[in-house]
């Protein structure tokens, strides 16, 4: 992929800084309003319950962190981490209206080197984040490092539908319509071209399950959502 002469991390950070204020609207439009439902499924899969301590990596505007916040309640705690200051600014603004604001904190940090000790969190999520990392395996290893033994690591991301016709229609939508929508609503077609290109390059859900296992997670599996347009990949840190 062409990052315009920048390294991938710088390109990704600049891209998300430039679309932060339009990000939530674009997400709802592109997913036809299904993104909230997908995030709720990820919250279920990570097993978030009242009183738990959760980490949401690449939290962006904090939508998934806030869903986790509802699940852990006032006795629990959610940390959302992202390296884009502009995405975090939107997250902090949305948090003001959240009933669970006291149990959620947003911090700036790098998913490649999480600023936490080992075995700290009851569960770790990443929503549409792994695709953006310069080293996918390093990102998964970091999430596996900071989750407690028995805790889950969950990725929600673009996947590869396999149903003929639906598959072709999906890629036409993603290749032609999404960049056009990005141009109209976010005034930034290149960012949405990157979305398409990064989704094309991202390993299919079956392969991501294998990579989760390679990174030390067990009981790895995936759930297809919306016909495999999106998938949730889950792994558990072994208790030894
Ligand atoms: C597509 S957004 C996903 C936001 C959010 N998780 C959601 O559910 O909508 C990807 C996010 O990953 C962040 N990101 C990419 N690489 C990162 C890294 N190395 N460290 C921290 N955040 C990163 C970007 O800044 C961006 O906010």
Image (tube, rainbow, N blue to C red):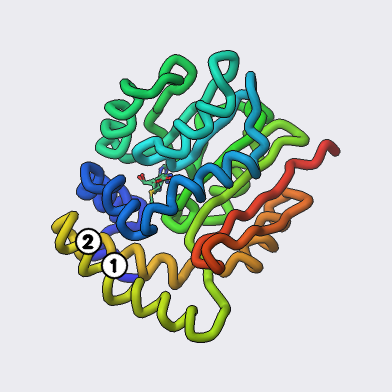
Residue 151 image offset from top left, x and y in percent: 71, 36
Q: Quadrant of residue 80?
A: top left
Is 102 placed left or right of 161 in the picture?
A: left
Residue 194 image offset from top left, x and y in percent: 31, 65
Q: How many tags in the picture?
A: 2
Residue positioned 59% across, 14% down in the render: 75
Residue 202 image offset from top left, x and y in percent: 49, 66
Q: Which mark is residue 178?
A: 1
Residue at disc 2, secondary structure? helix
Q: Which mark is residue 182?
A: 2
Residue positioned 35% across, 71% down in the render: 174
Residue positioned 60% across, 24% down in the render: 53
Residue at disc 1, secondary structure? helix
Is 45 placed left or right of 179 in the picture?
A: right
Q: Quadrant of the C terminus?
A: top right
The answer to whether residue 118 of the structure is visible from this angle is no
């Amino acid at each position: 992929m062409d990052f315009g002469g920048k390294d991938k991390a710088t390109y990704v950070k600049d891209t998300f800084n430039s679309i932060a204020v339009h990000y939530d609207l674009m997400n709802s439009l592109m997913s036809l309003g299904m993104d909230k439902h997908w995030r709720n499924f990820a919250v279920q899969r990570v097993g978030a319950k009242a009183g738990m301590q959760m980490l949401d990596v690449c939290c962006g505007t904090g939508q998934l962190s806030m869903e986790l916040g509802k699940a852990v309640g006032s006795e629990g705690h959610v940390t959302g981490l992202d390296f884009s200051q502009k995405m975090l600014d939107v997250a902090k603004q949305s948090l003001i209206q959240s009933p669970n604001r006291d149990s959620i904190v947003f911090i700036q940090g790098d998913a490649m080197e999480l600023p936490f000790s080992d075995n700290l969190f009851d569960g770790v999520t990443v929503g549409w984040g792994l695709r953006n990392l310069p080293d996918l395996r390093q990102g998964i290893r970091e999430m596996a490092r900071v989750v407690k033994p028995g805790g889950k690591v969950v990725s929600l991301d673009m996947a590869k539908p396999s149903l003929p016709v639906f598959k072709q229609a999906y890629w036409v939508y993603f290749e032609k319509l999404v960049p056009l929508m990005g141009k109209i609503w976010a005034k930034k077609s290149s960012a949405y071209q990157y979305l398409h290109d990064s989704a094309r390059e991202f390993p299919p859900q079956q392969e991501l399950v294998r990579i989760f296992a390679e990174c030390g997670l067990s009981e790895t599996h995936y759930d297809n959502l919306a016909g495999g347009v999106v998938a949730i990949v889950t792994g558990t840190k072994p208790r030894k």
